[in-house]
Amino acid sequence: MDPVVVVLLQSWTLDPWLIALLVISSALYGRGWWWLHHRRPQRFGIWEFLAFQAGLLALFLALASPLDALAEWLLQVHMIQHLVLMMVVPPLLWLGAPVLPLLRGLPRPVVKRGVGPVLAWPPLQRLGHGLTHPLVCWVAFAVSTLAWHVPACYELALQSAGWHEVQHLCFLGTGLLFWWPVIQPWPSQPRWPRWTMILYLLLADLQNTALSAVLIFSERILYPTYATVPRLWNLSVLDDQAAAGVLMWVPGSVIFLVPVGVLVLRFLDAPRVRRAAFVGTALLLMGVRPAWGHHGGEVRLMEKAGPFVITVFSDPTPLRVGPVDLSVLVQNGDSGRPILDAEVTVRLQQHGAGGPAIITEATRQNATNKLLYAAAVDLPASGLWELQVTAQHQAQAADVACMLMAVPPRSMPYSWWPYAALLSAMIGSVALQQWHRRRHG
């Protein structure tokens, strides 16, 4: 095993205060849950118990495991730590419906003379009522996430242990607020209709995607501290930064969209509506290529040239006038291993037109798949185009060429039809559900 990995696996931060807090919380919850389970098993089942204990375990791993040590050197590991604090620990804790078990787990005199009067204090109740409003929860979560990823604030947390703990508390606290209206732990009551949580989660996913895109596509180092620490496994700072953005984007979106799917299925509770929604969605997906399926585009050329094997991809298909993505994979001709430090140039010339050529550099920073070199080109006219790709690595260079056909751009109504169809399907599903309820109401 890699010696670095062995050392990191031994880097546990066993803070006695953290361990004591988690053990006491686990014991109190377990004691209260056991009492409630025997009296209300339908509300406090084994799944609630397991969810709460899993949330405590996830919190321990985020703050005490080698993740915390490795986060000082790799931004992508730091991102995993933050995702666990914001998007894994809070929903697991709330799924455990912890309010009553924790209160029931405390000694009765403590609840009667201490905790109970404090919780019944009107100013505290008004504060809690205001903080758990869905709008406050969403804004607090979004502001905390965006603010702490501003380079100045993030650097402050990296340089100061105290501010680093404040950052983690903000992520955990706003995460608990954010997931409160979504999970709605028993016995709390919803403040907004349940269907609004779909929009609530989708808007959160939108801001998460925008922030992750900044990390993925930025061509400069956003957090200079990571440029001064030892680089593990020869991973460059920009590649580490892009990987952190991918981790924020993909797992983060999955965590947001899973409850969206659950809410949609509950909302479309009528079998007839569910079948109609399923058929409509399937037909829509047959005609719309999802954005997350992009892996470089259509293969236009794969050729061995000199010491390399060069593969050229293009997107969209077919090529149209306007923005075009050209991606290149450069591999060692003998081993097939991807070459990640080559210089790749893309040259486009309209066939037979004699006009100026479009010459641009393809870089890995521009590519979503970091095995590729990508370049964004704006095709000005339809017709036949000559594409030439030159790859240079160390003292070796080679080039490949092919012809591309570009078709005229789509009209505006045709370009927007998938979104109009999706909106129509959603409106139709809601209308069908309301009709069904009125008919059988």
Image (cartoon, helix red, strand yellow):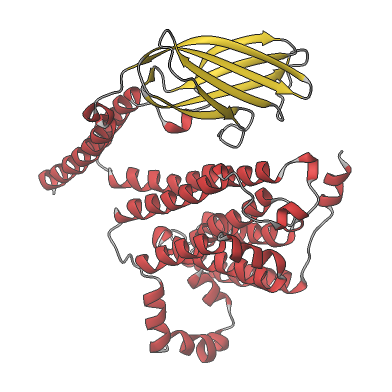
Q: Nearer the viewer, residue 308 or 371?
A: 308
**Residue 425's image quarter?**
top left
Residue at the (70%, 27%) spot, across then down: 342
Please say if 415 is above or below 261: above
* Residue 275 on image: x %, y %: 27, 32
Q: Nearer the viewer, residue 44 or 220?
A: 220
* Residue extending farthest bottom: 113
Q: Nearer the viewer, residue 64 or 94?
A: 64
Residue at the (68%, 9%) spot, across then down: 304
Q: Nearer the viewer, residue 33 or 50?
A: 50
Assign the N terminus to one quadrant of the image. top right
Q: Is residue 358 left or right of residue 273?
A: right
**Residue 336's image quarter?**
top right
Q: Is residue 319 left or right of residue 71?
A: left
Whether residue 4 appears in this view of the structure is: yes
* Residue 315 on image: x %, y %: 45, 23
